Image (cartoon, helix red, strand yellow):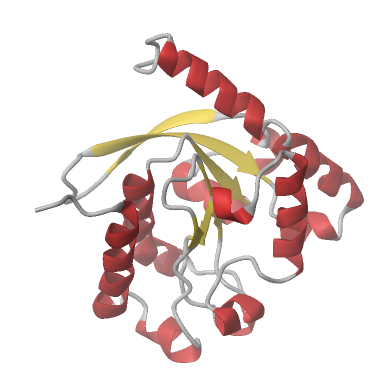
Amino acid sequence: MAAKTKQQLLEELKAKIEKDDPTPELRAGATQLVFGDGSPDADVVFIGEAPGKNEDEQGKPFVGAAGKFLNEMLAMVNLKREDIYITNIVKYRPPNNRDPLPAEKKAFLPYLQQQLEIIQPKIVATLGRHSLNCFLPELFISQCHGEPKRVKISLKGQKNNSLELVILPLYHPAAALYNGSQRQTLIDDFMKIPIILNKLSSNSKGGNNAK
């Protein structure tokens, strides 16, 4: 039997979330599950916190003003939405766009980890503090933005026990939109993505990928 494609595995994971129903209250107040969008073979995965109103209506992450800004920054580094993958920690819109609660983030974290295990990206760009703190809870985004961090996460009940990732903490585009200095900082940090990708590729070609 042919091995399943990454796209098939992601579709199965999406169906599993709908079946498991990890946050019934959030689901009840949302229009639909917002799972993720983009290439299952992406080198870069962007992770936000939770869907907003536009995302809830369209079923895709980052389709409002913040998404437009993200698309502009992708163009600056010669990438398109189809080249990357984008998702949120929490897959249902919280009521009135409130921040996701710790219990909601915790409920969705295993599914997020499975998404990353399927895609196997070279870089995970966290957008905002909620996303950053899922992987590096002790860090403050104001102190570590734009600095890549190598992390190892444990996967409970997965065929591989752990997953090694390079996390690139970035400010959230929605926050940066309305803050001039943060906007420029985000753009500057974003421009590091191709540089980090090149470095990771040259390391792996040189046999240093076990570092």
Residue 99 image-quadrant placement: bottom right
Residue 147 image-quadrant placement: top right
Of residue 53 and residue 100, the one placed in the foreground of this image is: 53
Of residue 38 and residue 99, the one placed in the foreground of this image is: 38
Report whether residue 115 is seen.
yes
Report whether residue 140 is seen.
no
Residue 56 image-quadrant placement: bottom right
**32 left or right of 179?**
left
- List the single residue furthest toward the right: 180
The answer to whether residue 146 is above or below residue 183 is above
**162 left or right of 180?**
left
The answer to whether residue 184 is above or below residue 82 is above
Of residue 139 and residue 55, the one placed in the foreground of this image is: 55
Residue 190 x, y percent position in the rendering: 71, 39
What residue is shown at x 77% (from left), y 42% (from top)?
A: 76
Residue 211 x, y percent position in the rendering: 39, 15
What residue is shown at x 49% (from left), y 22% (from top)?
A: 201
What residue is shown at x 31% (from left), y 57% (from top)?
A: 110
- List the single residue furthest toward the front: 2
Residue 179 x, y percent position in the rendering: 87, 54
**25 left or right of 55?**
left
